[in-house]
Image (cartoon, rainbow, N blue to C red):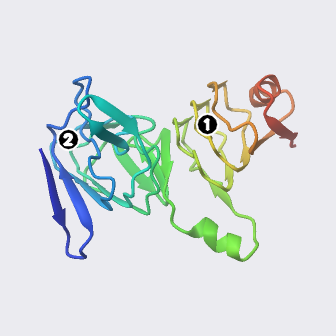
């Protein structure tokens, strides 16, 4: 069931319970049925959040599509135990609140990580980049050390420079899709999926002879050798 309401600030919200399903019958916890909702509250009892869970829109019966919703705030209950890569795809979130004791998700600064801190899922748009841009100063977003995997769509549609730590080993598909900026890719990276980086607007800063260097050359991605 889905419950519509307005919170104390008058923001249109949708409360989503654990019975919401995707068309394939898998318990995916959430389908955004309101293109105008600004806030989402997942009710306690939901245990898993799937890819694109907040950006699936039902046009008609048996007809679905992904879209960019107006959601700016999401509340994740403590019952969530697993969050798939790409769960926050297509969003422009400003705020994410996580219930106490939640083991499936954690927030480190503006970095949204899996509960164990090993998968990078999303970066909140907290205005830091825009602040530096207005001052004509460069800004590099630093992914927390300990992250081993950059998930699908993690930085898609972002415009900034990103520094990946030496702990990163895997970069998933479309992690930097529609991305504009440079990405420091360390020698620790052992695998990059197809379409991980936007070809025309993304540049990789890599060590000569590294896996990332060879991958970028093979896939015709702009790259620069760094020491």
Whether residue 164 is visible, yes or no, is yes
Instruction: Measure the C-alpha gap from mark 2 to mark 1.
Output: 29 Å
Q: Is residue 50 left or right of residue 139?
A: left
Q: Position of residue 171 (x, y in %)?
A: 60, 32
Residue 149 location in percent, x, y?
54, 35
Judged by depth in the image, the label closer to the viewer, 2 or 1, is 2
Residue occupying image coordinates x 21% and y 24% = 25
* Quadrant hosting residue 194: top right
Q: Quadrant of the C terminus?
A: top right
Query: What number is the disc on residue 18?
Result: none
State the image coordinates of residue 165 (x, y, percent, origin top left). 65, 44
Query: Regarding mark 2 in the picture, which secondary structure is present there?
Result: loop
Q: Quadrant location of residue 7?
A: bottom left
Q: Is residue 140 left or right of residue 213?
A: left
Give residue 46's quadrant in the image: top left
Residue tagged by mark 1?
168
Q: Measured from the top left, where is residue 142 in percent x and y? A: 63, 54
* Crowding at mark 2 (Cα within 10 Å: few <14, some 14-19, many 20+): many
Query: Which residue was labeled with disc 2?
Result: 46
The answer to whether residue 135 is above or below residue 6 is: below
- Is disc 1 surrounded by few (<14), some (14 to 19) or many (20+) residues within 10 Å? many
| 105 horizontally vs 161: left or right | left
Q: Quadrant of the N terminus?
A: top left
Identify the secondary structure beneath mark 1: loop
């Amino acid at each position: 069931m889905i419950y519509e309401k307005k919170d104390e600030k008058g923001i249109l919200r949708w409360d989503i319970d654990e019975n919401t399903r995707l068309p394939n019958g898998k318990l995916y916890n959430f389908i955004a049925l309101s293109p105008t909702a600004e806030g989402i509250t997942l009710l306690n009892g939901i245990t898993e959040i799937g890819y694109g869970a907040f950006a699936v829109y039902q046009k008609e019966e048996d007809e679905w599509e992904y879209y960019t919703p107006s959601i700016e705030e999401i509340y994740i209950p403590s019952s969530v135990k697993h969050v798939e890569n790409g769960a926050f795809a297509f969003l422009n979130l400003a705020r994410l609140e996580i219930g106490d004791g939640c083991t499936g998700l954690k927030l480190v600064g503006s970095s949204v990580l899996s509960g164990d801190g090993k998968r990078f899922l999303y970066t909140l748009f907290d205005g830091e980049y825009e602040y530096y841009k207005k001052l004509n100063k460069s800004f590099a977003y630093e992914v927390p050390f300990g992250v081993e995997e950059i998930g699908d769509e993690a930085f898609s549609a972002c415009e900034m420079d990103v520094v990946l730590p030496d702990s990163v080993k895997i970069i998933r598909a479309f992690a930097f899709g529609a991305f504009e900026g440079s990405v420091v890719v360390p020698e620790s990276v052992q695998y990059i999926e197809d379409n991980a980086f936007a070809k025309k607007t993304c540049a990789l800063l890599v060590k000569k002879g590294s896996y990332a260097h060879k991958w970028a050359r093979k896939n015709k991605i702009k790259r620069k050798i760094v020491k």
